[in-house]
Image (spheres, grey):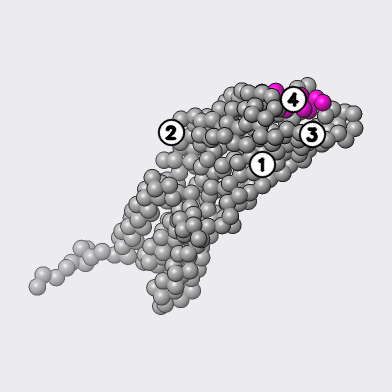
Amino acid sequence: MMEIEESDKIGPAQWTVIAVAVAFAAGSFLYRYLMPNHRWQSSAMFIGLPTVLAVLLALTPKAKTVTGGIMKGITLFLLIVAPLLGEGWLCILMASPLFYLVGAIVGKIADWDSKKRGTRLSCLVLVLLPLSLEGVVPQLTMKRSQTVRVTKTVNASVVAVERSLAESPRVTERVPDWISKGFPQPLAAWGSGLEAGDRRTIHFAGAEGDPPGDVVMRVAEHQRGYVRFETVSDSSKLTQWVRWTRGEVDWKAIDAQHTSVTWTIHFNRQLDPAWYFVPWERAAVHEAARYLILANATPMGTR
C-alpha cells in the first residue's frame, strides 16, 4: 500500500480554514434564503444565523480558545456582509451585539468542557432554536404594537401652534446624526389642513437599491387642542423597521406665549426578537416625535 507522505496530510491549520469556509458558506446560504423569503426581520436572522455560525466555528480545531475563534469568525463574516448591504449596514450595526452575544455563549460552553463539547452544543441548539423562531412562527411572536409619547414646550401661543400644525409638513429641519446616517430621509412633503379627511404626504428617499416611497396620512379627528392622523399608505423603506399606524397631537396653553405640545406615535415594530429590538425602535421613534414637534408644531421664527 502506498503510504501518504507527511507533506500530503491535512494539518490543523488547513482543517481550520476548511471549517471556517464551510461555516461562511452555511451562513451565506442561510442569509440568502432569509432575505427573499421576508424572514430577514425575524429572529431567524438575528439569533438563528449567528447560532449556526457559532456552532460550526466551535467545531473547528481548537486554537487558544473556541470563544476567540468564534469572535474572529463572526467579525470576518460581518465585515464581508456589511458592504454588500448598502444602507443596510445600519441593521448590521444594530444586530452586531446580538451576534457577538450568541457567539460568546456558544464559545464559553464549548470551552467549558471539550470532552462533552458536542453534547453541550446540541443541548444549546435546542435551547436557542425556539428563540430563533420569533417572527417566523406567529405563536412565538411577541406583541408588535408600540406607543411612544414626547412632550415639549413650544415658545408660541396655542393659536400659533395650531396654525403651524395646519400647514404643510416641513422637512428642512436638521435630523439627528444617528438617525440621518442609516434611515431613509424625508425629501419633500405636501398637504395641509386639520379638517377630517385632509391629507399629508411625506416623500422619503430610497435605500438599498429600492426606489423612494411615500407615507400618506389623513386627519381622522380634530377637536380643540387635539388632532389625530391615521396612516393611509406607506411605501417608504421605513417599513423595514417600523410601520406607522397613527399619530396624535395634543396642545394646551401654559401661558400666553408658551404651549405644551405632546406628540404620540403608534407603530408596529418589524424586527425580532422583541426583547432586543424594541428599545432600538422606540429610541428612533422617540427622536422622530421630537423632530415632528420641532418641524411641524413650532411656528417659524420661534425656534
What is the spatial separation of the Cα atoms under label 2 and label 3, in whole angstroms?
Answer: 41 Å
Q: Nearer the viewer, mark 1 or mark 2?
A: 1
Determine the residue positioned at 23% across, 65% down.
9
Secondary structure state at the residue bearing disc 4: helix
Q: How much space separates mark 1 and mark 2, taking CA atoms?
A: 28 Å
- Identify the residue at the far left of this view: 1
The residue beneath circle 2 is 209
Badge nearest the viewer, 2 or 3: 3
Classify 157 as above or below 8: above
- Ranked by sequence position, the earlier of labels 1 and 4 is 4
Q: Mark 2 or mark 3, which has the lower sequence index?
A: 2
Q: Is residue 50 visible in the rendered structure shown here?
A: no
Marks 1 and 3 sit apart, C-alpha to C-alpha, by 17 Å
Q: CA distance from mark 4 to mark 2?
A: 35 Å
Q: Which residue is mark 1?
A: 265
Q: Which residues are magenta?
A: 159-168
For badge 2, the amino acid type reads: Gly
**Which residue does the numbered mark 4 point to in the structure image?**
164
Q: On the picture, is 27 further left or further right than 286?
A: left
Residue where numbered disc 3 is placed: 225
Relative image position of residue 171 (x, y in whole percent): 64, 26
- Judge whether 226 appears above or below 32 on screen: above
Q: Earlier in the sequence, mark 1 or mark 3?
A: 3
Q: Nearer the viewer, residue 299 or 197?
A: 197
Viewer can see residue 265: yes
Mark found first going from the N terminus, 4 or 2: 4
Q: Residue at x 36, y 57 (%)?
A: 23
**Residue 164 among magenta residues:** yes
What SS does tag 1 mark?
strand
